[in-house]
Image (spheres, rainbow, N blue to C red):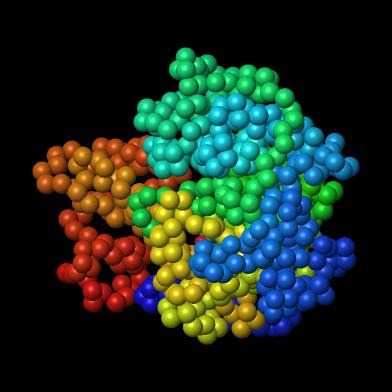
Amino acid sequence: MEDLAREARQEKVESQEETTEALLEEGRVFRPLPQLVVDANLNPNDYEDAMKSGRSDLEAFWEEAARELDWFKKWHTVLDRTDAPFFKWFTGGRTNIAHNALDRHVKTHRKNKVAIIYESESGARERMTYYELYRAANKFANVLRSLDIKKGDRVAIYLPNIPEIAVVMLGCAKIGAVHSVVYAGFSALALRERINHAEAKLVVTVDGFHRNGKVIKLKEVVDEAMTASPTVETVVVVQRAGVDIDMSDGRYLWFHDLMDGEPARFETVEMDANDPLYILYTSGTTGKPKGVVHCHGGYMVGINRTLKWVFDIKETDIFWCAADPGWVTGHSYIVYGPLIAGTTTVMYEGHPLFPGPDRMWQIIEKYGINILYTAPTTIRMLMRFGAQHPKKHDLSTLRLLGTVGEPINPEVWVWYYENIGNENCPVMDTWWQTETGMFMVTPTPCNVLKPGSAFKSFPGVHVDVVDAHGEPVEPGKGGHVVVKEPWPAMLTTLYKDPEKYKEVYWSKIPGMYLAGDIATKDRDGYLWFQGRSDDVLKIAGHRVGTAEVESAVVGHKHVAEAACIGVPDKIRGEVAKIFVILKEGVEEDEDTLVNELKDRVRKVLGPIVVIRGITFQDKLPKTRSGKIMRRVLKARELGLKEGDLSTLED
Ligand code: WTA
C-alpha cells in the first residue's frame, strides 16, 4: 500500500500550492454568491456551527438531522458501536424510507405537486404527482404481495431511467423487500450473476427502451439470463417500447396487467432502522462484484441532509440528477433523496447527444431546471462540441451545478461554471461512493471553491488523507482516503459476506474505513482526489474491476493469462488496456482474436467496458508469489518510472 501511495500522481494542480487568499486575489477561487447564501438552507454562520457540532458531537449532529424525518418509533441509541465495524445507526428506531418519500407528503400540500418529470428520448414527456406516484407504489407493493414476495425477499430490477423504476423501488421498500437494481447496460451474464448471488425471487424488466436512436430490447437480455436463474419465480415486464416480445413462458407477466388488478391502498410496512433496503453490486478488486447493503434508517437521514445542504434543495426546485438509477447516484439522488425532500426530480431516458449535442441544454430550458448534477465525463463530452450549443438555450433558471464520479479537471470545471452556469452557479464537486451512500467530501453553496477540488468533509463526516499507518500526510503529499468515524448512510455489510466487509474496508488501516482512493490535501485543508489506489477503473464514471475484465478475457479458449490496466482518456477519464498471453500453439491471427476478445468482454460484462487496446505478450511482470504487477504495466504504458521492482520475479 505504501507503494501505491508513493505512486500517486505527484504532479499537482498548480493551485494546490497556493493559499486561498493568494488565489482569491488572482480571481481563481470562487466566492459564495450573495444571492445564493441569503436564503440558503445552510448559511455561512450555520455552516461553521454545523462543522463544530459535527466534530464535537457526531451523534447529536446526526440526531438533529434524523428528527427532520418521520419515524414510527423513535430510536433509543443514535450510534451503536458495540459490534464495530458493523456500526448501527438509530437502533430501536422504526421507520420506512418510502413513508418518508411518499406517504407523509400526500397528507400535505405536496399531494398534487409534480414528483417526477420524465422525458423519453423521442421527446415525449410525462409527469407524475406525489399522489400518483404514491398510488402506483402502493399498487406495486400489492402486486409484490400477490406474487408472494415477503419482507426480506430480494427483487432484481433491470430497468432503464423510466418512472416505473421509481415505482418498483418504492413498492419494494413499502413491503420491506430488498431491491437489487442492475444497471440496464450490464450484459445477461452480469445480470445473471447478480440475480443468483442475491437469490432473487422476482425480476422486473421492460420490453425495450430508447438509447441513441436505437431500441434496446432489454427483455431479450433477461431471457438469456433466465436460462440459469433457478431462484426466479416471476418476471414482471413493463411495456414501454412496444416491441414484439415473447411472453409465452409462464414466468413472465405484464406489469400493467398486474397493476390493474390491485388496489391503490397499502399500509407501508414498519421497518427497523437497520433492516436492509437494497443491495447494489459494485466492482472491487476481485473478479466478483460486491453486494453493498444499505438500510432504511441511517441511509435516509444521510441522503436527506446532504441533498438539502449541498444542493440547497427547496420544494420549489426542479432537480436534475442526470445519472442512471442503476448506480448509487440514481438511488440516492434521483429517487430517494429528491422525493424525501419533496422536490421535483427529472428523469431522462436517452443519450445526451441524441438527436444533437444540445439535448441536455434543451431539457434544462424546457422544464426550467434549477439544479443540474452530472458527471465530468458528460461535461467533457459536451464541451467538445463547443459553447455555441448551450448558448442556443435559456439556462437562466439554473442556480447550482454539481459533479460526481471522478475527479474533474479544473479547466472542465471552469467551462461548466462559465458556459452552463453563466458564472452564477457554484459547482458542487461531490466525492462519495456506492459504499458511502451519500456525499462525503463536498462543498456547500456557502464555501469558497477551488476548481478541481471537492473541498472538505461535509459537516458530521470525517474524511482524511493518511499514510499506510493511518498517520495524516503533509500538505501536498499523496495518501489514502479514509473515513475516521461512522456516518449514517454507510453500507452496513457486504451481502452474504460480512468477513469481506471487514477485510476490504476496515482491516488495512485499523479503525478506519479505507475508501480505495488516493488524494492530497492542500494547506487550506482542501482535498484533491487523484483516482483509485486499487485495481478499479473508472470508465466514464463507471466502476469496473480489472479482475472482472481479466476473468472475462481468460474465459476465451485461446487465452492463458491476462492483465488489465486503466489508461487515461480525454473524454472517459480512463479506458481499459489489456495484455494477453496466449496458450501454446494458437494459430488464429491477432485481429480476429482482438475482435473475439472485445466481443467476449461485452458479452460477459456489457458495453460499459471501453477497451483501448489488446496486445499479445510472451510474459507479464509478476511478483515472486505470482501476482501480476499491473502498476509496472501501467508505468511502462505511460512512460513513467517503474518504481520499486525488487519483488519482481524477472
Ligand atoms: C470516484 C459514485 C473524484 C472515486 C458516487 C470513488 C470521485 C468512486 C468523485 C466511487 C469526485 C466519485 N472526485 N473522484 N467528486 N466522486 N469518485 O461507487 O474514485 O460508482 O472511489 O460511486 O468514484 O464510485 P461509485
Q: Residue 404's x, y, as percent?
A: 60, 57
Considering only vertical position in the picture, is 326 above or below 75?
A: above
**Extreme residue in the top direction:** 248
Residue 438 image-quadrant placement: bottom right
Q: Which residue lies at the image location 69% right of the left edge and 79% below the top edge?
A: 56
**Picture coordinates of residue 323, whole percent (x, y):** 61, 46
Residue 243 in view of the camera = yes
Q: Nearer the viewer, residue 636 or 190?
A: 190
Instruction: Reply above or below: 633 against 266.
Output: below
The image quadrant in which ligand 1 is located: bottom right
Q: Residue furthest left?
A: 585
Decide if residue 570 is on the left or right side of residue 145.
Answer: left
Q: Is residue 190 left or right of residue 413?
A: left
Q: Quadrant of the C terminus?
A: bottom left
Is any atom of residue 407 visible in this view?
no
Q: Position of residue 434 (x, y in %)?
A: 54, 55
Q: Residue at x 80, y 44 (%)?
A: 104
Is 646 left or right of 201, judged from the image as shown? left
Quarter of the image with the N terminus in it: bottom left
